[in-house]
Amino acid sequence: MDIEDDDDDIYDDIVRLRQTTRRTNWRHRATSLSQRDVALATTINSSIAFYITFTYILLFRLNSLNNAIAVNNNRQSALYGRLLYALRYYQCLFRFCCYEIDFLIEEEADLLYLREHQIAPIVTEPPRNRAINELTDEVAYSLTRFTKEQLRQLFLHWRLPEEIVTEHRHHFSGEELLIVCVAKIATGDP
């Protein structure tokens, strides 16, 4: 009973299936597969398909060997001993394929299925450093090489609007744009 309960806990813990990453949004990185993971999942899936096909072939071969053994009445002949040896060989191959399929399915489940503890929490903090007043004096100088008062003067002299809306309907404050632009200039980023 305990083993079945443990298995139920493992499967209840699965939250969702990982998807191939189509964007680089940091909010979705825990729920998507990287390129390496996609290649690994494809290899695992291909191996599972191979072993399943090979298992079917082995089942047909085992059936034909069982029929040949049933037809052979002479248990003392060399052919009967060879048939038993071949039967044992194919049974071992069949077991090996079944173990490999189990192992590959577990590996695929570990790669593709997200558990509750693997989901990264989405950050729900309020936006920070979006206005000049929200910056401390040290942060303002380390980011932009300007003091807070100098940043206010730049904002007035550059005549930036209070709010900027892009063509994709993203809203930015003028102070936020100023801080980002000046910080990029200060660090030498293009």
Image (spheres, grey):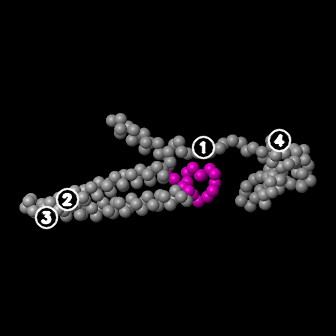
From the viewer's perspective, tell me whether residue 60 is left or right of residue 184.
Answer: left
Q: Secondary structure at mark 3?
A: helix
Residue position marked by numbered label 1 in the rendering = 121
Residue sitting at x 32%, y 62%: 54
Q: Are marks 1 and 3 in contact (CB under 8 Å)?
A: no
Residue sitting at x 59%, y 59%: 22
Residue position marked by numbered label 2 in the rendering = 85
Q: Amino acid at mark 3?
A: Leu
Camera-side mark, 4 or 1? 4
Camera-side mark, 1 or 3? 3
From the viewer's perspective, tell me whether residue 53 is left or right of residue 13.
Answer: left
Residue sitting at x 39%, y 51%: 103
**Res 89 visible:** yes
- Mark 3 Cα within 10 Å, few/some/many (few <14, many 20+)? some
Which callout, 2 or 3, points at the residue further toward the start of the chain? 3
Cα gap from disc 4 to disc 3, whole angstroms: 90 Å
Residue position marked by numbered label 3 in the rendering = 79
Q: Amino acid at mark 2?
A: Tyr
Cα gap from disc 2 to disc 3, whole angstroms: 10 Å
Which numbered tag is attached to residue 189? none
